[in-house]
Image (tube, rainbow, N blue to C red):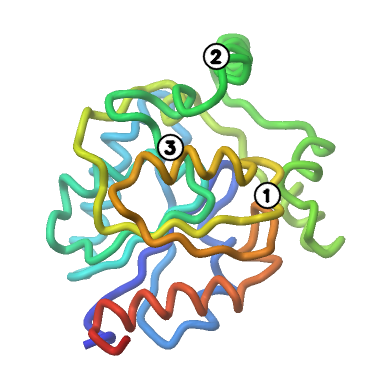
Amino acid sequence: MANNVTVVFLHGAGMGPWVWERVIQELSTPAVALEIPGRSKNATPDNCAAAIAAELDRLGIGPVIVVMHSLAGVLASGLAERLGSRVKRFVFVSAVIPPSGGSFVDALGFMNRQILRILFKFNPNGLKPSPKMIQHELCNDLEPQDTEEVISRYKAEMPGLYLTPVKATAPIANATYIKLLKDQSVPPAQQDSMIARLSKPLVREIDAGHLAMLSAPMALANLIQEEVEREAGLR
């Protein structure tokens, strides 16, 4: 049944569980947004996945649909390994999916890989874009008050989730990828490259920017609710 599945939301770079509040309000199924513990010097995709799996155990959560936005895509293989059949589906929302055995930066173009490595080299205690860059890449379709909140709440990120390779694994099969057609941070063409790393994913689209959970929460919630109902055999 649909109510046996919990939707688990994982945020992207700079954000926190708060960014999912509007989407959760639109769902008619149990849901929880978790903090990714990636803002420490020893953070890696593997130990962050382990921490999230442990938190789900602590909360007594059984079957899950895991929704991952942007940077959170690096956790997919680690969560698949730890949660096994508990994961009914992965839903990637404009997420970056590293090549098998590669890191977040390995999913980017050559110039962006080099730039990000250099930036982290000179900012080992955390990297945070300028307000202008945050506004351009993340807030192009947001209301002014939402843009202000995103800029004020954006947190610096450590290099671990960006530079540490994930384990080499087979492509994830039970996946849906939600393309964000107005995304300035992970443009649609780059999202297509991520989709190609999955095994026969279901692809859906929303005409929204990178933070669709703020600009189009109902549209995003509707697609996620469809996934819940599909897994429950209601579609």
Label 2 crowding class (10 Å Cα cut-off): few <14, some 14-19, many 20+? some
Secondary structure under tag 1 reads: loop
Q: What residue type is labelled 2?
A: Arg
- State left or right for residue 83 relative to residue 139: left
Q: Earlier in the sequence, mark 1 or mark 3?
A: 3
- Distance in Å between CA atoms under marks 1 and 3: 23 Å
Q: Where is residue 26 in the image (x, y as percent from the top left)?
A: 54, 83
Q: Residue 125: where, in percent of width, then height?
A: 55, 21
| Label 3 or label 2, whichever comes before in sequence order | 3
Q: Quick one: which residue is furthest to the left in this view?
A: 85
Q: Which residue is drawn at 42% across and 47% down?
A: 36
- Which residue corresponds to mark 1? 183
Q: Say which label, 2 or 1, has the lower sequence index.
A: 2
Residue linked to disc 3: 38
Q: In this view, does 128 lie to the left or right of 222?
A: right
Can you say whether 120 is above or below 127 in the image?
Answer: above
- Say which element carries label 3: loop
Q: Is mark 2 on a helix, strand or loop?
A: helix
Q: Residue at x 50, y 64 (%)?
A: 204
Circle nearer the viewer, 1 or 3 = 1
Q: Which quadrant holds residue 58?
A: bottom left
Q: In which quarter of the image is residue 220?
A: bottom right
In this rendering, the label closer to the viewer, 3 or 2: 2
